[in-house]
Amino acid sequence: MRVKYNRVSTINQSGNRFTNDTEKYDLTLLDKVSGNICFKERPQSLQLIRLIEAGEVTELVVEEFSRLGRNTGDVINTLDWLEERGINIIVRNVGLQSRPNGIKNPIWKMVSSIMSSLYEMELENIKERTAVGRLVYLQKGGILGRPYGTKERTRDFLNKRYSREVIKYLERGFTVREIAKVVGVSTRTVMKVKSLI
């Protein structure tokens, strides 16, 4: 089975950028979680893992290494786990395969380690630029959060996409911290949804 795995960082992202891929796959999966969440803890990854352990997957396609994650250690562990099971991993943006024609690619490990490190560093740079941007905004008199005196209706809040995701996981019995990680929201948001339902 040939599987395409996509990931976007938040549930508000559509993943439409992956639609340019016109290749044929037996299954296409899309996780809407932060790249900091371990690969083996993501909802769609869990489905993929079950298929791999059942021996049904032979090839896994991703757009870029960062779709597997933004934590170098986790990405390398995931790649090693996939390699142990003989899965050919194809990374489209660099045109690299781990096992082309079933033969182990000798440069795969080196390139995948370097690329994973670069994507983790990119995430750290994004966080740093965001923090600096917020600080400059606040220094210029900006205010973060909802404008004073405004109030969101409960129904509108609970109808937001991330609120519906939180409700789904609450009904399945996940903990507040697990839900916050999987959905990509704060524990405070999860608690707010929980109190409102």
Image: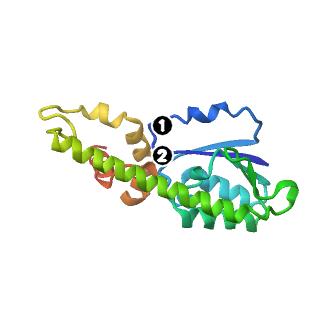
Residue at 87% of width from left, 54% of height from top?
101
Location of residue 30 by image quarter: top right
Residue 13 screen position, x and y as percent: 48, 37
Q: Which residue is mark 1?
A: 13
Residue 95 screen position, x and y as percent: 73, 47
**In the image, is residue 1 above or below residue 152?**
below
User: What residue type is disc 2 on?
Assistant: Ser
Residue 20 screen position, x and y as percent: 66, 31
Location of residue 82 by image quarter: bottom right
User: What residue type is disc 1 on?
Assistant: Gln
Q: Is residue 185 visible?
A: yes
- Disc 1 crowd rating (10 Å Cα; few below 14, some 14-19, many 20+) is few
**In the image, is residue 9 above or below residue 116?**
above
Does the residue at mark 2 contact the one at mark 1 (Cβ under 8 Å)?
yes
Between 125 and 197, the one lying in front of the other is: 125
- State the separation of the CA atoms marked 2 and 1: 7 Å
Residue at 37% of width from left, 35% of height from top?
160
Q: Which residue is mark 2?
A: 9
Instruction: Quarter of the image for the C terminus: give it.
Output: top left
